Image (spheres, rainbow, N blue to C red):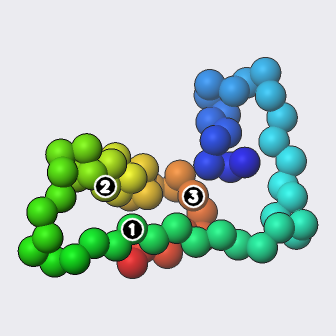
Amino acid sequence: ASLAYIPKQDHDLVMHDLSNLFPLEVTKIAYLKGKYLRRYQQRFIELFQACVSEPGRWPGLLPV
């Protein structure tokens, strides 16, 4: 839920830490070097990268 919860926007909601109930999930994006990526694929990777790179957005996140 921390991925979807933004305190400034979601001031009318409450977030509860339930990390002890669920295992850690890992998302990886992989593609072949030199392989042509469609524009929407490149854009998705750029958007994902920008979110992950945002400092303090996801505490404990380890960049790869």
Pointer 2 and pointer 1: residues touching (CB < 8 Å)?
yes
Could you tell me residue 62's position as x and y percent?
49, 75
Image mark count: 3
Residue at coordinates 72% horizontally, 48% vertically from top-left? Answer: 1
Between marks 1 and 3 in the image, the one whose residue lies nearer the viewer: 1
Residue 45 location, quadrant: bottom left
Label 3 residue SS = loop
Question: Callout 2: few (<14), some (14-19), or many (20+) C-alpha neighbours within 10 Å?
Answer: few
Left/right placement of residue 31 relative to residue 27 reads: left
Residue at coordinates 12% horizontally, 63% vertically from top-left? Answer: 36
Answer whether residue 46 is visible to the viewer in this image. no
Label 1 residue SS = loop
Which numbered circle lies on residue 58? 3
Between marks 3 and 2 in the image, the one whose residue lies nearer the viewer: 2
Mark 2 / mark 1, whichever is N-terminal? 1
**Front in this rendered view, residue 30 or 56:** 30
Question: Callout 1: few (<14), some (14-19), or many (20+) C-alpha neighbours within 10 Å?
Answer: few
Residue type, label 2: Ile
Residue type, label 3: Trp
Could you tell me residue 19's position as x and y percent?
82, 64
Which residue corresponds to mark 2? 45
Answer whether residue 24 is visible to the viewer in this image. yes
Pointer 1 and pointer 3: residues touching (CB < 8 Å)?
no
In the displayed structure, 34 sits above or below 55; it is below
**CA separation, marks 2 and 1?**
8 Å
Residue type, label 1: Ile
Left/right placement of residue 5 relative to residue 64 reads: right
Label 2 residue SS = helix
Which residue corresponds to mark 1? 29
